[in-house]
């Protein structure tokens, strides 16, 4: 995610910290705080999901590199075996 989203998340977390430090009994305020906390939880879940996607993508790339290396090794082994069989 962009740095803008991280800055907004940081601001929202500071607002929630302030709200929790200065509680209110107003039902509208409590409802708004609850909605804000739900949205922060959802944003954190999306950030985790994106982070896991990057990790999975990196692992897949590494797996492709390993696969290509092994295919090259098998091709060389088959070539050597065919040369020996032809003699």
Image (cartoon, rainbow, N blue to C red):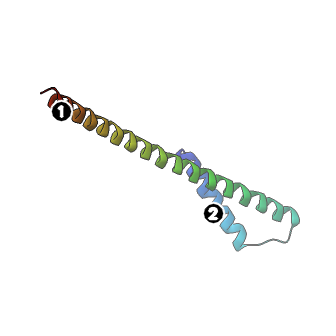
Give the residue at x 33% y 36%: 68
Q: Nearer the viewer, mark 1 or mark 2?
A: 1
Per the rendering, the mark at residue 15 is none
Give the residue at x 37% y 44%: 62
Residue 7 at what x, y percent from top left?
57, 52
Residue on which the image places disc 2: 14
Give the residue at x 35% y 39%: 67
- Asked if 87 appears above or below 5 in the picture, the reply is above
- Find the distance from the CA under tag 1 to the CA under tag 2: 66 Å
Give the residue at x 64% y 52%: 43
Q: Are marks 1 and 2 in contact (CB under 8 Å)?
A: no
Local secondary structure at mark 1: helix
Relative side of 26 to 44, left or right: right
Instruction: Using the rendered view, name the quadrant where residue 21 is placed.
Output: bottom right
Residue ranking furthest to the right: 27
Earlier sequence position, callout 1 versus callout 2: 2
Relative side of 56 to 48, left or right: left
Residue 42 at what x, y percent from top left?
68, 54
Relative side of 86 to 20, left or right: left
Relative side of 28 to 54, left or right: right
Residue on which the image places disc 1: 80
Residue 16 at what x, y percent from top left?
68, 64
Local secondary structure at mark 2: helix
Residue ranking furthest to the left: 87
Q: Is disc 2 surrounded by few (<14), some (14 to 19) or many (20+) residues within 10 Å?
A: few
């Amino acid at each position: 995610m962009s740095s803008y989203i991280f800055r907004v998340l940081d601001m929202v977390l500071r607002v929630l910290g302030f709200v929790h430090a200065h509680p209110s009994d107003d039902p509208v305020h409590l409802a708004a705080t609850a909605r804000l906390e739900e949205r922060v939880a959802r944003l954190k879940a999306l950030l985790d999901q994106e982070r896991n996607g990057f990790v999975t993508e990196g692992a897949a790339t590494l797996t492709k590199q390993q696969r290509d290396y092994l295919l090259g090794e098998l091709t060389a082994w088959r070539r050597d075996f065919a040369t020996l069989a032809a003699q």
